[in-house]
Amino acid sequence: MKIFTILLALSLNYSLALGQGIIFAKQVNNNDNLYFINKKGQTRQITNHNRKDSSPMVSPNGKSIVFTSERVGWWKIWLMDIKENKFKQLTHLSDAEYGPSWSPDGNHIVFVSSRNGNQEIFIMTKDGKNIHNITNSNTSDTMPFWSNDNYIYYSSEVKGVYQIARCKSDGTNKEIITNSKGNKLMPQLSNDLTRILYYSDVDGNYEIYVMNVIDKMINRLTNHPLMDIRPRWSSDDSQIVFERGNKGNNHHIYKMDAEGKNVKQLTFKNYNYAPSFINKNK
């Protein structure tokens, strides 16, 4: 078993170093762990723990994975060194802390915490130090993503509806970008800085949308009776990975091109969620 674990870590490290594939979480027998799918559709298990591991994102240099875990109780932020197969707990309070995302340079991590009484956006260095709140709002702020324009995009509750918002990493230049019906969740700016990807229930069911940054024109990408949620761009903005399902056994990872065409199912068993491309810095 020890030899197999070492070989798995080495082979996984090689795949991640190439920047090829998708990382996600899979629940098997009520146990959640991190998995990897390469371009050939081959799936490998990354973590193997009896407590839940979730919401993984690979660092820009491909060396680390930041993720959420219940290894020591309620959700906390953890870091995995891929080459060494070592783990480090980054947050330690009793409050739920989750939804981590890397800064473009890989030196900081943005995440969600309820340590101040409601959901807020926090930043820390990659070693878990210098934690500070950047939103300081009376309502809920959640689902952050640190984009290449050095803004952090997130969903902010405005009059009971989640709108797309952004701010600088020091909390300045706060801006509510949208002001319309329907929750707009998990916004992510494209790498070419022209489109914002998100999912919304504005049409009665959660579907995936993109909004042009300049004219704010919106294009709906999916139309399916199941929920389409948590989309992520590929590094070249040509593909989108997402979840489709009903929060039950029928919940899988899919990918499609940037226009919503050529939808392909990637997982077929168990409950699969929180996918993201492994996007190494060029």
Image: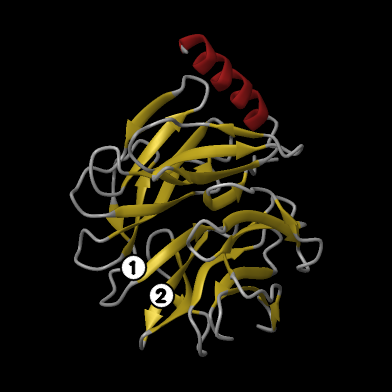
> Which secondary structure, mark 1?
loop
Q: Quadrant of residue 17?
A: top right
Rendering coords of residue 219 (x, y %): 71, 79
Q: Is residue 178 left or right of residue 258?
A: left
Q: Amino acid at mark 1?
A: Thr
Identify whether 110 is placed above or below 120: above
Q: Residue at x 43, y 30 (%)?
A: 48
Q: Nearer the viewer, residue 212 or 160?
A: 160
The C terminus - image quarter: top right
Circle number at residue 156: 2
Circle number at residue 135: 1
Rendering coords of residue 187 (x, y %): 54, 67
> Which secondary structure, mark 2?
strand
Rendering coords of residue 275 (x, y %): 57, 51
Q: Residue at x 27, y 43 (%)?
A: 91
| Res 239 seen here | yes
Q: Residue at x 51, y 31 (%)?
A: 46
Q: Quadrant of residue 197?
A: bottom right
Mark 1 neighbour density, 10 Å: few (under 14) some (14–19) many (20 or more)? many
Q: Could you give the CA–CA distance between mark 2 and mark 1, rounded to whole angstroms?
A: 9 Å
Q: Are marks 2 and 1 in contact (CB under 8 Å)?
A: yes
Q: Amino acid at mark 2?
A: Ser
Q: Residue at x 35, y 35 (%)?
A: 127
Among the two numbered marks 2 and 1 on one chain, the one whose residue lies closer to the N terminus? 1
Identify whether 234 is placed above or below 43: below
Circle number at residue 248: none
Q: Nearer the viewer, mark 2 or mark 1?
A: 2
Q: Nearer the viewer, residue 174 or 75?
A: 75
Identify whether 49 is placed above or below 10: below
Q: Nearer the viewer, residue 183 or 229?
A: 229
